[in-house]
Amino acid sequence: MSEPLLDAYRAVRSRMCAIAAELSPSELASVVPSCPEWTVHDLLTHNVALPAAIGAGDLPGDDLQAWLDGLVERRRTEPLEELLAEWDTLDDVVGGVLSATPVLLDDHATHEHDLRAAVARPDHRALDADLVLPAALHALAAGATERGLGAVVVESPDGVWRSHDAEPGWVLDTSAWEGFRAVGSRRTAEELRALPGEGDVEPYLAVIDAHLPLPRTSLREP
């Protein structure tokens, strides 16, 4: 398995656990704007329950969302301290998953910044862009290809990343963090249209929305 992926995952987990340890009961019970069906405690539960379920052989069927919802629902009342302690024991499972796909790192990195926004602890530097942005962009490749569209490209002072090997169709000229949030469905259609860049964003709105529904109102992330 790729050690850089596991190291990046551990860094995400460490930062999330540090934030979680500081939260008051009211903060843990607050709603996550980017995942409004979840409280902060639910979001943290998801991050633990997902790899734990895979390690136990509890895999999704045809309805992925129902499976994900069930993981949180079944463990919703578990104490935070127990969840975070369990999370530290799951490296073997996580390593196995990451050896096949970086999607787990992408998911948890996305939720780190969902958590940060929900509890007003932003940190745009907390992002291993060279690992998470390619995964986030690649998730859009099939949808773009099916629609005959070119690649989605994020150009920032820290690097350039693209969804797939094709001529650029939509280029975002922005920071790595903003690009990550944009392609990960954390921006409204109007906000995506307003991002600096080149190309016609309109056909890509459907690509992003099909992967993960776009928010209908701004998350107003700092």
Image (cartoon, rainbow, N blue to C red):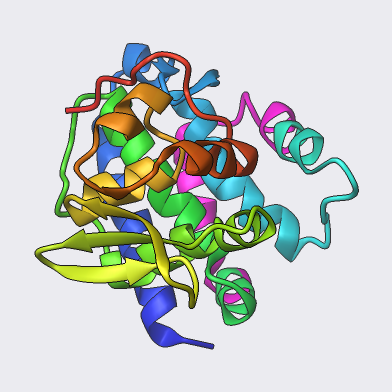
Q: Is residue 79 left or right of residue 120?
A: right
Quadrant in which the C terminus appears: top left
Magenta residues (range): 71-93
Q: Is residue 138 above or below residue 222?
A: below
87 is within the stretch colored magenta = yes
- Count of numbered badges drawn on the protein: 0
Q: Residue drawn at (22%, 56%), measured in percent from left and top?
A: 176
Q: Is residue 31 visible?
A: yes
From the top left corner, tell me how far across and down residue 181 is, in percent: 34, 43
Q: Residue drawn at (59%, 82%), measured in percent from left and top?
A: 99
- Rendering quarter of residue 148: bottom right
Q: Is residue 82 visible?
A: no
Q: Is residue 202 above or below residue 16?
A: above
From the top left corner, tell me how far across and down residue 103 is, in percent: 56, 62
Q: Residue drawn at (29%, 19%), measured in percent from left and top?
A: 24
Q: Residue drawn at (31%, 27%), measured in percent from left and top?
A: 191
Q: Is residue 169 left or right of residue 90?
A: left
From the top left corner, tell me how far across and down residue 163 is, in percent: 46, 66
- Rendering quarter of residue 29: top left
In this view, the residue in front, 25 or 66, is 66
